Amino acid sequence: QVHLVESGGGLVQAGGSLRLSCAVSGSTFSSSAMGWFRQAPGKEREFVAGRRRSGGMTVYADSVKGRFTFSEDNAQNTVYLQMNSLKPEDTAVYYCAAGGPPWDILIASRYDYWGQGTQVTVSS
């Protein structure tokens, strides 16, 4: 059984920073793709950042490049999303996902496991 538990969301002013954490239990952490997605009200869930395998190359959506950083702690089976220079358009529920195929990490439907989501609200 795989469980993902996110934390770190909250309310922040534009230009501020937040760090999201996702603790993963189960054997999928190192062998499968992991990603962060977000979903704003009335919009589809979109890819934010992720990596294909543990220690592998990270991939970012164009909208967050240079502002967000994906990282991981293999000893703790935890992935992080450091978010800097936040903008009001970053407001969304952020989800951690695991169990995706390494060759197709951008598509939400390809992931097997999801966290409960954490709200990020950026005020202007």
Image (cartoon, grey):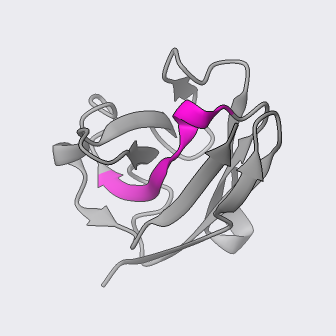
- When the figure is inspected, residue 49 is found, relative to residue 123, above or below; the finding is above
- Total labels drawn: 0
Q: Is residue 91 magenta?
A: yes
Q: Is residue 118 magenta?
A: no
Q: Quadrant of residue 46?
A: top left
The picture places residue 35, in percent across and down from the top left corner, at 45, 46
The residue at the point 22 percent across, 60 percent down is 112
User: Camera-side residue: 119 or 78?
Assistant: 119
The picture places residue 98, in percent across and down from the top left corner, at 37, 57
The picture places residue 106, in percent across and down from the top left corner, at 32, 31
Query: Taking 27 as reference, is 109 left or right?
Result: left
- Looking at the rendered image, the quarter that the N terminus falls into is bottom left
Would residue 123 be seen by someone viewing this image from the given angle?
yes
The residue at the point 43 percent across, 66 percent down is 117
Q: Range of the magenta residues?
A: 87-99
Q: Main secondary structure of the magenta part?
A: strand
Residue at the bottom extreme, as displayed: 1
